[in-house]
């Protein structure tokens, strides 16, 4: 299981996808409670990973500050690649940090910059309004909603609306759009996107 966030040294798609998948695996195990039940992953490992996220948050030219882009540079990166290699690892990172904040508060208490880093990550997450790319934009949006809802982000924003009002407003707008569609009997998108499932993720916003 991943113990340190890293940025690929070269434009190696397989390596970059591997990093995102490893982050996703850690997040899933955090939610299921498996992380600290494994002999090779203890609380200090989780803290070290959070520290690596703090240290690895991007801020250089070519991508706005606050992401966890896994590519060496986002300069010239196509839009579809940005969704998967810049935005998705950012959604996963803020979900991990939020889950740790809620479930293991002793970790952020030891890291003074934790809140500022998380806030910048939340802000970066607003830049595509949680949408994906092209014909898969809504499908990818629903995937993002699932990441954020079951991993504590929406709960945290509901309890702390001033932490990132921009992200909360986007979530409320998506909820409004889905509610309107369902009210008109529209339960799926043009490409089969499941609006009923999507609404479940945002209903408590």
Image (tube, rainbow, N blue to C red):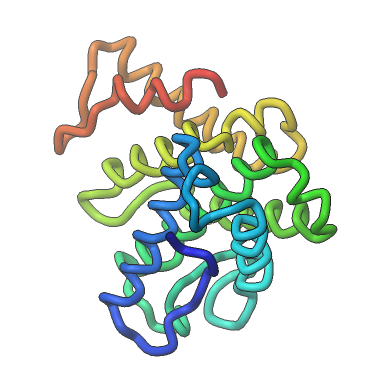
Compared to residue 74, the image places residue 19 above or below, namely above
> Of 58 and 192, which appears nearest the observer?
58
Asked if residue 126 is positioned above or below residue 146 in the image, the reply reads below
Q: How many callouts does the rendering have? A: 0
Q: Quadrant of the N terminus?
A: bottom left
Quarter residue 28 falls in: top left
Residue at 82% x, 49% y is 109
Q: For the point 60% across and 41% down, which residue is it?
A: 99
Whole-percent x and y of residue 134?
A: 25, 55
| Image coordinates for residue 116, horizontal then vertical, percent | 77, 56
Front residue of 85/46: it is 46
Classify 59 as above or below 80: below
Quadrant where the C terminus sits is: top right
Where is residue 154 drawn, in percent x and y? 57, 32
Q: Which residue lies most toward the left here?
A: 191
Q: Is residue 93 left or right of residue 59?
A: left
How far across and how far down the image is residue 194, in percent? Answer: 24, 28
- Most distant residue in the bottom direction: 10
Question: 130 or 37: which is nearer to us?
Answer: 37
The residue at 35%/28% (across/down) is 198
Residue occupying the point 43% across, 81% down: 8
Q: Quadrant of residue 52?
A: bottom right
Direction from residue 135 to residue 94 in the image, left or right: right
């Amino acid at each position: 299981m991943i113990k340190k966030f890293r940025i690929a040294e070269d434009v190696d798609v397989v390596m970059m996808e591997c990093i995102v998948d490893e982050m996703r695996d850690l997040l899933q195990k955090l939610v299921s409670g498996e992380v600290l039940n494994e002999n090779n992953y203890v609380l200090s490992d989780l803290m070290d990973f959070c520290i690596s996220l703090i240290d690895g948050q991007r801020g250089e030219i070519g991508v706005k500050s606050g992401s966890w882009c896994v590519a060496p540079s986002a300069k010239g990166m196509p839009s579809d690649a940005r969704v998967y290699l810049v935005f998705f690892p950012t959604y996963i990172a803020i979900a991990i940090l939020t889950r740790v904040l809620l479930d293991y508060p002793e970790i952020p208490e030891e890291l003074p910059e934790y809140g500022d880093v998380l806030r910048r990550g939340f802000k970066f997450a607003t830049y595509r309004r949680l949408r994906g790319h092209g014909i898969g934009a809504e499908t990818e949006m629903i995937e993002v909603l699932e990441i954020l809802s079951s991993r504590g982000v929406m709960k945290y924003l509901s309890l702390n609306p001033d932490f990132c009002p921009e992200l909360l407003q986007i979530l409320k707008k998506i909820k409004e759009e889905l509610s309107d569609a369902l009210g008109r009997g529209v339960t799926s998108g043009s490409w089969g996107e499941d609006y009923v499932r999507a609404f479940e993720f945002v209903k408590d916003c």
